[in-house]
Amino acid sequence: MTILTNKADKIDRLAELTQSSETVAGSSLWREAFRRMRSSKMAIIGAAIIAAFVLVAIVGPMLAPHGPTAQNWRSEVFPNQGKFVGMRGENWFGLDHLGRDMFSRWLVGARQTLLVGVVSMLIGLIVGALVGVLSGAAATLGGKVGRRVDTVIMRFTDIMLSLPSLLLAVSIAAVLGQSLTTVMIAVGVVQIPIFARLLRGSMLVQGGADYVLAAKAVGIRRKRIVLTQILPNSLSPVIVQATLSLATAIIEAAALSYLGLGNPDPAVPEWGVMLSQAQRFFDNEPMMAAYPAIGIIITALGFTLLGESMREALDPKLRG
Amino acid sequence: MSLLELDDVKVHFPVKKGLFFDRTVGHVYAVDGVSLSIEAGQTYGLVGESGCGKTTLGRAVLRLNDITDGGVVFDGTDLAKLPGEEMRAFRRRLQMVFQDPLGSLNPRQNIESILSEGMAAHGIGKDQTERREKIKAILAKVGLPSNALSRYPHEFSGGQRQRIGIARALVLEPDVIICDEPVSALDVSVQAQVINLLEELQESLGLTYLVIAHDLAVVRHISDVIGVMYLGGLVEEAPSDALYAGPRHPYTKALMSAVPVPDPEVEDRRERILLHGDLPSPANPPTGCRFHTRCPWVQETKCATERPPLLDTGDGHKVACHFTAEIEAGTVKQTLATGIEAVTGTETVAAEAVETAEGETPAGKPAAAGAPAEEPATVPAQADADATEQTEGSPKA
Ligand SMILES: Nc1ncnc2c1ncn2[C@@H]1O[C@H](COP(=O)(O)OP(=O)(O)O)[C@@H](O)[C@H]1O
Ligand code: SF4
Ligand SMILES: [Mg+2]
């Protein structure tokens, strides 16, 4: 139960982020948050890491000095005998166990990792937001029946939240079979209840705001109120969560690949797969694991730093 | 017949608990049987301390809260039982101005959008051009520049935002406007401006107001009739002048004693009636007279067992107290102190307390002297601070 309450509490706190009415609001809320973020080291470092990562992911594969799957130096590497080739002028990150250029693989892997992260996050965001809007709309304007619908949906998401996310992802991946799509779906599904609960909570907070009451008082129809008043004002926490989710998605995708549930085609490099392959040779050539691992850690850190600093910048309680 | 009549209106909020499906475990009796009527073109002032149910009552009239029981008859139609869509149509004629001017404006909508949305919902104006012309005229009426149209709420000052809130109500050409503490969030310097604006608008447009406030000073000048609320019910209602000239309910007396008087001589003689304890929870209201836990005149009979109805004591001065006449005539004794001891916690009978206070407290003397002589020297620091404040208002020898 503690897992459930911790996770749920964290989401609920995020949902209440933009609740306070005495602060600057709306478009100026983000403008103000942006101003605060510009003077935050955390935000700048996070943004710089993300920028570098995205740049590598986009142009990296084009700049890769060698083919990522070409076993050009197969004859120089003897993994059975523990003979590897480390950093050298021709191969900056050395060679892997099949004599492929690690640097080129790393660059191409960055793109795969970004793709997996973004797609999984989007799966979670889109489905979660739909569920959240449904639940939030039912709760705010559906009367008694709506509140029941909302309760059922929320209990279901609570149950999903209470399961350890990796366990859930592994179960889904096991059902769907081994592939890159599987990883993205599994990681995305884990994010669904988070986005659903967050958006619904945020909508409830906004739904109780005076301006919503005022819209009702001037006679605007309830559906219109939800779409034009409540929803646009409920999105800030979701944007923050989307950023934070990129970090967890990348880590979880890597974990699934590491567990062997990812892309079965070892020819397509992805940081999680690379890490998984490297573990067998960890005793002889730890650097083979270090490159993808560092890539994963640093990008996850970048998204977390940016997400957390956004959260802080938007939090009226922390505003000076 | 009055334009707006409330008949025994009750708003009880269910308190929910439960793991899967919520179970009702109790109720908050926010409004518990309020009847009042407002004449066309008049202003009804509703006062009471915060948490007594004023906002809930105001919102119930527009059905922004569900009405648990009772009737809200507006111009011959009972709104309480109206189906949703018909109620929505009626909202054009009953409008509301909110307490928090910024919070009641959508931060993402510009002023034109905020003001025209309601008009569109009620089919006022054929197109946006026509609506814009009308909005401009209303903006001028409430004292806002017409370039306000394309700006956003956060770009305005508090007073201007409240003017926008008033304009939002006015564009629908309502008959009744419910003003829920319209100035309590504003700087004192602009409060009067907004109150004056409301008054001017009433004159030029023939509006009917229900003005809610938590202190008597705000509603005094604009109200024709004032109702005093305590814990979900009306305890006194009278024409404004009559209420100020002679409050009859013990609670109103206490409330009135807190209002400063402009005349310095009267102000000096002003005797503050301080009440014991805090406002009880509306989830668990006292039996009988809701005020009996704090009433300085509480009697052993009736007060704790029978709820006093709001009865006319002559000239439309209505009071909900079993002992109105006796208190007036002085035939029942005050049973709880109303001086500083009410706050420090001594249970001395008031008459003695006043003597003590007069004897021992030269005006302006430090706090500790404010406590009665019998009081042990362990008066908490907080009480000391209170005492200083109250010494200033207490009678001077
Ligand atoms: N939606 C609600 N659910 C439960 N209790 C409420 C709700 N709205 C108000 N209350 C309670 O009803 C009482 C009266 O509130 P309110 O009408 O806002 O008082 P006032 O406007 O006089 O300060 C308060 O105790 C408040 O906590
Ligand atoms: S009925 Fe009793 S308790 Fe209530 S106000 Fe009158 S004297 Fe006080
Ligand atoms: Mg209120």
Image: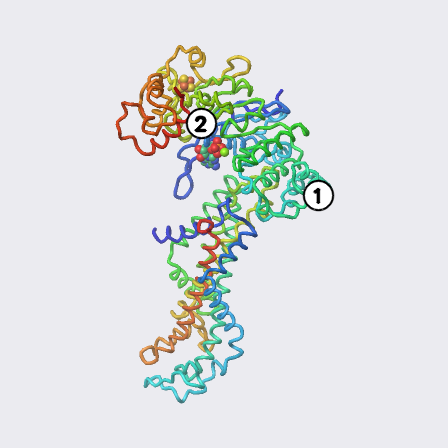
The residue nearer to you, when weighing B266 against A33, is B266
Name the residue: 39% across, 70% down: A258
Q: Residue under circle 1?
A: B132
Label 1 packing within 10 angstroms: few (<14), some (14-19), many (20+): some
Give the amino acid at mark 2: Leu
Is residue A289 visible in the rendered structure shown here? yes
Is residue B13 visible in the rendered structure shown here? no
Give the amino acid at mark 1: Arg
Mark number displayed over residue A105: none
Q: Is residue A236 above or below residue A273?
A: above
Residue B203: x %, y % from top left: 66, 27
- Report in which chain the residue with disc 1 lies: B
Label 2 packing within 10 angstroms: few (<14), some (14-19), many (20+): many
- Report in which chain the residue with disc 2 lies: B
Mark number displayed over residue B231: 2
Name the residue: 40% across, 29% down: B279
How are the residues colored? rainbow
Residue B278: x %, y % from top left: 39, 29
- Asked whether the residues under the numbered discs 2 and 1 touch, taking CB atoms below 8 Å apart as contact, a structural biologist would say no
